Image: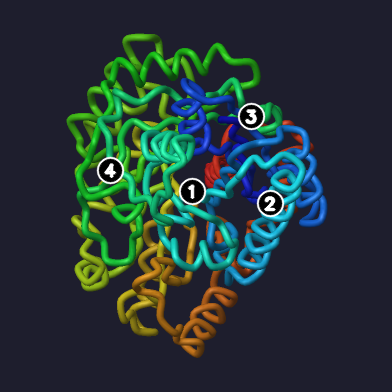
Amino acid sequence: MRVLFVSTNRELLPSPVAPLGMLAVAAATRAQHEVTVEDLCFTRDVPHALDTLRAAIARARPDVVALGVRNLRDNAYRDGGALAEYHAALGGCAREALETLETTKGTGARLVLGGAAVTLQPAAMLARTGASHAVVGEGERAFPALLDALARGERPDTLIRATPAPLDELPRAAWDLVDRRYFEREGTATVQTKRGCAFSCTYCDYPDLEGRTVRVRAPALVADEVAALARTAGVSHLFFVDSVFNAPRTHARAVCEALIACGAPLPWVCYASPAGLDDELVAQMARAGCVGAEIGTDAGTDAGLRRLRKPFDLAQVRRVRASFRAHGLLDCHSFVLGAEGETADEAAATLSFVESLDPDLAVFLIFAEDREALVAARDVEHRAALRALLAREAPRHPGWIVPELGVRFGPKVTRLVLRRALRGPSWLHLARARRAERG
């Protein structure tokens, strides 16, 4: 079958992110099917994105259009109304173009959804786009199986729920199909060393996306992929996009050892948890090429951490901060305000903790539920109070970032990175400037 993969994400702030999941599914699909890819990330506006989609469908004449939908909100974590309208417009546009093909060719073409946003809200996304099918979960096996069923003339279920697979049995992402502008802008490629999360943090949707059982890749295969990306034109940095790079700790150490053995071919960053992130592991990460980490600290009180079911306390956060400074790694701690019944006093206490911790950067988000089964009415007044608190306090602290309010986040930062041709994730440049200011 002819399959057109379409990456629908148009988020450019703080930097564009290549569609790793879609490239992984495309790699698994092209073994048996004809695959083309259209990426809408660099379209200038929604009408341009729709025109680009129409042209791609007319050009590829696909039997199936696979829309990859990554986000329910923008990276400033604002309300997703505009994105919902965009997704609906994409669905209508794709269906109209496919109907034209059916009228002229009788192809029986179909529209299929996949991606993180679809896994979190499958029913809503199906209703919004009018798609014929949606793949919930990872698609490397589920999507080709759906194509095979369609080719046989079967009538598969509308919702296809994927079964997690051993990661070493799946092909590497099809980086040869990526839009080269991702690398031209900042040079960052993305790699997973594992999927799944065994933590039970109350607000987090990673277990919904990847499962609660951690599946790891062989460290040698991870290192081989990193080495191959280091030879790819334009790639200067790597982002390990595991939900938590350092859990399990034994696997993180093994990946670091494999990277050290092949010469630490790329500087890299990762997502990390303070849990189990001791000085020995931080030192090993530095030797393996790590230059910084985005650390999910999330709350600034021990009571808040317990309520969120975080597997660490504030003392461990302080130890991690000290280790990062000692080994020359940059740290960007994220904090989620307004989750799990947090009071105004607790939010203020979190800000006081961040002030005393004094990380290179601190990112503040106001919690909003994305999981379809748990979406509920928001406490509008409390959210407004948290925004007011952050609007008052964040500008006073050079290392504090509030995406929702545009504090040290937005087009200005992007323009600065582009103008100076800076390489690597944008937050690294802010963190380096912050550290240089402090001496």
Q: Please name the colour scheme applied to the rendered image.
A: rainbow
Q: Is residue 317 above or below residue 173?
A: below
Left or right, residue 353 beside residue 75: left
Tag shown at residue 114: 1
Q: Which residue is mark 3?
A: 36
Whichever of callouts 1 and 2 sits on the residue coming sooner in the sequence is 2
Q: Nearer the viewer, residue 429 or 94?
A: 94
Q: Which element type, helix, strand or loop, lies under badge 4?
A: loop
Marks 3/4: CA distance?
25 Å
Q: Nearer the viewer, residue 189 or 133?
A: 133
| Position in image of residue 384 (x %, y %) | 54, 84
Q: Which element type, helix, strand or loop, lies under badge 2?
A: helix
Q: Which residue is mark 2?
A: 94
Q: Crowding at label 3, few (<14), some or many (≥20) Cα neighbours within 10 Å?
A: some
For badge 4, the amino acid type reads Thr
Residue at 34% x, 35% y: name it. 326
| Position in image of residue 431 (x %, y %) | 54, 44
Q: Which residue is mark 4?
A: 163
Q: Where's the N terminus, which quadrant?
A: top right
Whichever of callouts 3 and 1 sits on the residue coming sooner in the sequence is 3
| Position in image of residue 92 (x %, y %) | 69, 60
Q: Is residue 341 above or below residue 320?
A: below
Q: Which element type, helix, strand or loop, lies under badge 3?
A: strand
Left or right, residue 272 beside residue 420: left
> Pointers 1 and 4 in contact (CB under 8 A)?
no
Q: Nearer the viewer, mark 4 or mark 2?
A: 2
Q: Crowding at label 4, few (<14), some or many (≥20) Cα neighbours within 10 Å?
A: few
Marks 3/1: CA distance?
16 Å
